[in-house]
Image (cartoon, rainbow, N blue to C red):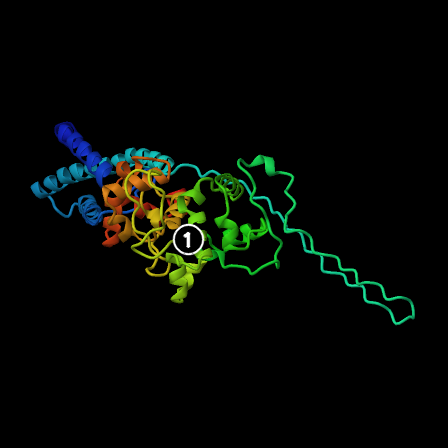
Amino acid sequence: MTYLFSTYWPWMLLALVLGAIVGFATFLRSGKGWWPDAWPGWFKLLSLLFLVGVVVAIFKWLPGLLGHYLETALLFVGSYIVGCFLGSWLASFRAREEVEASEPVAVAEPTPVRVTPPVPIPPLVITPTSTPKPTPAPVTATTSAPVSAAPTDDHIHPGQRPPAVPKGVGAVDDLKLIDGVGPVNEGKLHELGIWTFRQIAAWTPENAEWVGSYMAFPGRIEREDWIGQAAQLAKGLGTEPSRWADLGDASASSGFASSAPAAAPVAAGDHPGQRPPSAVKGVATPDNLKRISGIGHVNEEKLNELGIWTFAQIAAWTEANAEWVGSYMAFPGRIEREDWIGQAAKLAKGIETEFSRRVDHGDVPTSS
């Protein structure tokens, strides 16, 4: 055996280097160490043959020249296998860096302050008694004016708080017919004393700025044109979400994006490019968009707000769509750099990627 080492050590070194290259390039790592997550089928067969050869060499079942050839082959194969483990261990450092840099840290949104509208005072009527005294005129206490007391923290939000109306003064509209207003946002508007389309249609830009800051999504009211939609609904004109509600689609009144392929109106010049088509939740089974490298919890929620639920939708994006979404999500150019469209096209066809496998194995913390 010493003779074999001294004679064939250059070839053993070459096999070791070749194995390290193959292990670095092909083995699936999770960033936890040198042990791979998945073994290629050919490597399993090679390891099995190596073990069989070791047993045959130990018991000297192949004497003479054949035994010499077997021991030489075992030295080369053993060096190759050790090189594969070495390459996998080196690649684990690169996998660890990808996991750490794959997703930005989500920033917690401020908790909105709950403001309870004042309760109207019921009318108090004093009826005359049956005594022979002169009948007094009935005294009626009128209800309070439809003005809500401003909260003490109004100054922390830019703009001006819109006028509030106590509940019960007039008919209450279904504010979820406005694209972008779901059950949660409707509840927040009710807390502010906003009950009808006419109230929202009468907002000034300062009112929209104040409500956007109060509801922790500044600029969204202007982008989704709540005021314009409310003005149409107040006149009895339908909008896309309201037409879905009239057709009996419950998801349209739940605050999800408008039906495909029509998208909610966006003011010109807000974002470069073109907004991609959106879909109503429930029309197709939502995919786990976090299996795309670069999309974590926060980015998946932003895509869902735009009506993006499936890999097929992202795979169909044009360059203009990617530019619009990148600007909307405040990281222009990132979608193109990380190739979201290409990754989505593979996943839509059922083709796995290395990142999607790591997500499925639970090795990407931001996608757990």
Residue 366 lies, with reference to residue 125, above or below; the image says above
**Callout 1 crowding tier (Cα within 10 Å): few <14, some 14–19, many ≥20:** many
Please state if 176 lies on the left or on the right of 354 as rendered. Answer: right
Viewer-side residue, 4 vs 306 = 306
Furthest toward the right, the residue is 132
* Quadrant showing the N terminus: top left
Amino acid found under the numbered disc labelled 1? Asp
For the point 56% across and 42% down, which residue is it?
A: 161
Task: Give the SS element for disc 1.
Answer: loop
How far from the left and from the top, in percent, is residue 343?
26, 45
Q: Would residue 332 be seen by someone viewing this image from the given angle?
A: yes
How far from the left and from the top, in percent, is residue 206?
51, 38
Viewer-side residue, 339 vs 214 = 214
Furthest toward the left, the residue is 65
Q: Would residue 37 be seen by someone viewing this image from the given angle?
A: no
Please state if 304 lies on the left or on the right of 346 as rendered. Answer: right
How far from the left and from the top, in percent, is residue 300?
38, 47
Please state if 234 lies on the left or on the right of 98 as rendered. Answer: right
- Residue 21, by quadrant, is top left
Viewer-side residue, 292 vs 148 = 148
For the point 31% across and 56% down, which residue is it?
A: 260
For the point 59% across and 51% down, which residue is it?
A: 193
- Residue 103, by quadrant, is top left
Furthest toward the front, the residue is 134
Please state if 213 lies on the left or on the right of 287 as rendered. Answer: right
How far from the left and from the top, in percent, is residue 45?
19, 49
Q: Name the residue that disc number 1 marks.
A: 179
Q: How many numbered discs sit on the rendered protein?
A: 1
